[in-house]
Image (cartoon, rainbow, N blue to C red):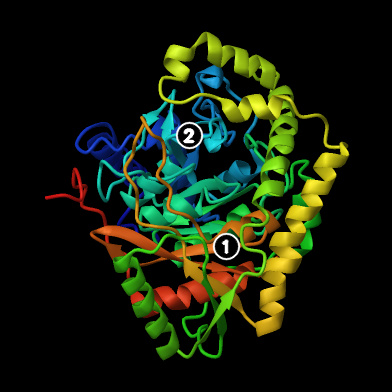
Amino acid sequence: MAGGDLSSARLTEAYLDRIAALDDAGPRLNAVIELNPDALGEARALDAERKGGQVRGPLHGIPVLLKDNIDALPMANSAGSLALAEHRPRRDAPLVAALRAAGAVILGKTNLSEWANFRSTRSTSGWSARGGQTRNPYALDRSACGSSSGTGAAIAASLAAVGVGTETDGSILCPAAMNGLVGFKPSVGLVSRAGIIPISSSQDSAGPMARSVADAAQLLNVLAAAEAGGDRAAQAAAGKRAPDYVAALDADALRGARLGLLRDSGVRSHPDQDAALQRALQRMREAGATVVEVRMPTQGKWDGPEFEVLLYEFKDGLQRYLRDSDAPIKTLDELIAFNRAQAEREMPFFGQELFEQAAKKGPLTEPAYRKAAARARQLAGTQGIDALVNKHRLDALIAPATTPAFMADPVNGDAFGGASWGAAAVAGYPSLTVPMGEAQGLPVGLAFMGPRWSDARLLSLGYAFEQATGARRAPRYPVSVNP
């Protein structure tokens, strides 16, 4: 673009053509749920600015896709639900306003696991009533994982330059790992959550999904600069942001680093993934890292308190969002009633057990909530990640992110094989996944986790690992792994 060989309008048109060819036709990934009708107009306006000598930054004219739980005009924000299919917010979420100010072209919205996978105990990741089933570009019968499944599949298939996902517990890292991407969940509060349909005020964060760590860091620079927009956690994090996450990247960051390899991380073993991990460890040692085996002393003990917290916070946060954004439905009870009335379209495969459990919860002032929230943070944070980092003098914890992609199965739901990011998710700490290899053609990722506000350090370690391995391979859209 700087040399005049490419315009934002041409690039935007190329992505729109690619979406038509791969998402709507061809393999039919079903990753994009809605296009921004103003995208080409925005691109042309940004081209005019560039021609006039005004360049807002590295994202000037770059098309970006957003998960369909983020307010972005003039599109609907639905969380994949028919109940909000016509819900058009009054303003952009602060992170979207920051992207526009940085010159990004908002290309459209991506499909997701409906309500960010917090509706049923046996949901199918990547499915929503509004958007249908997203398919994994590495094998079309496999799950793209949830809940940022559409963003994962879209960016893996190069339907946009970068994408924004959101995560409570694995919803960035899982689709990134299973779609051969870099996915980064920042420390909670680093990025404003205002204007995003929520699950958990203590665990939610938006974050970048990209084909390289450098692209993820470039996007994070903009996301982290968004106004807090009433998000108290984001207001409190204002002084914790790195000045430039791209400048902090160091290809030699593994030299002298101490990494704790989590054994018994909760990820089911797979021989191809185990082999990829051993190759990754060898490359890191060759790059100068010291890897020590460690065990999380509180592994999985936070699960019960976390679930209690999510039920309380989902009801509280969702109803606040619905009210403040003037949505057509105002309460969780109304949403439950809508789903029952539209059961044939909304619940053809699975129900809304989590909604019904959350509806029974009271306010966040209840002692049961306060006790569970304190316990979850303690087990995952103070007694979990912090204890391991301090005891072994670690820069980060590492582990396979999750298993290779499982089959998309609307009858039985997800055959999830476990994950290593749980402690970071519950504690509100940063986590990153970077491609480390393949298992029968399906991508597998390596997760990096660290203490709160170690975002820049994690990205730098992941960048050095990426440069040392070059493990990512582009998808080829086979119908199945089987011949």
- Residue 192 or 468: which is nearer the viewer? 468
The residue carrying pointer 1 sits among few (fewer than 14), some (14 to 19) or many (20 or more) residues within 10 Å by Cα, namely many
Please name the residue that numbered disc 2 is placed on.
Answer: 122
What mark, if any, has residue 431 been given in the picture? 1
Q: Residue reaching furthest top? A: 341
**Element type at mark 1:** strand
Which of marks 2 and 1 precedes in the sequence?
A: 2
Q: Is residue 328 visible?
A: no
Q: Is residue 415 above or below residue 279?
A: above
Q: Secondary structure at mark 2?
A: loop
Q: Nearer the viewer, mark 1 or mark 2?
A: 2
Q: In this view of the protein, which residue sits in the foreground, 175 or 274?
A: 274
Q: Residue, x 36% and y 53% (percent of image)? A: 179
Count neighbours of disc 2 (C-alpha within 10 A) and say few if under 14, some if 14 to 19, many if 20 or more: some
| Picture quadrant where residue 307 is located | top right
Residue 295, given in percent of the width and then of the height, sits at: 59, 73
Q: Amino acid at mark 2?
A: Arg
Distance from the alpha carbon under mark 1 to that under mark 2: 25 Å
Q: Is residue 183 left or right of residue 21?
A: right
Across and down, in percent, residue 429 comes to 66, 61
Residue 482, position as x, y percentages in the image: 16, 49
147 up-or-down from 6: above or below: above
Does 387 sit left or right of 49 as displayed?
right
Residue toward you, 197 or 43: 197
Corner quadrant of residue 272: bottom left
Q: Is residue 232 left or right of residue 102?
A: right
Question: Which label is found at residue 255?
Answer: none
User: Taking the image as drawn, is residue 335 in sight?
Assistant: yes
Image coords of residue 123 (percent x, y): 47, 34
Residue type at the position of mark 1: Ser
Are the residues tagged 1 and 2 within 8 Å (C-beta)? no
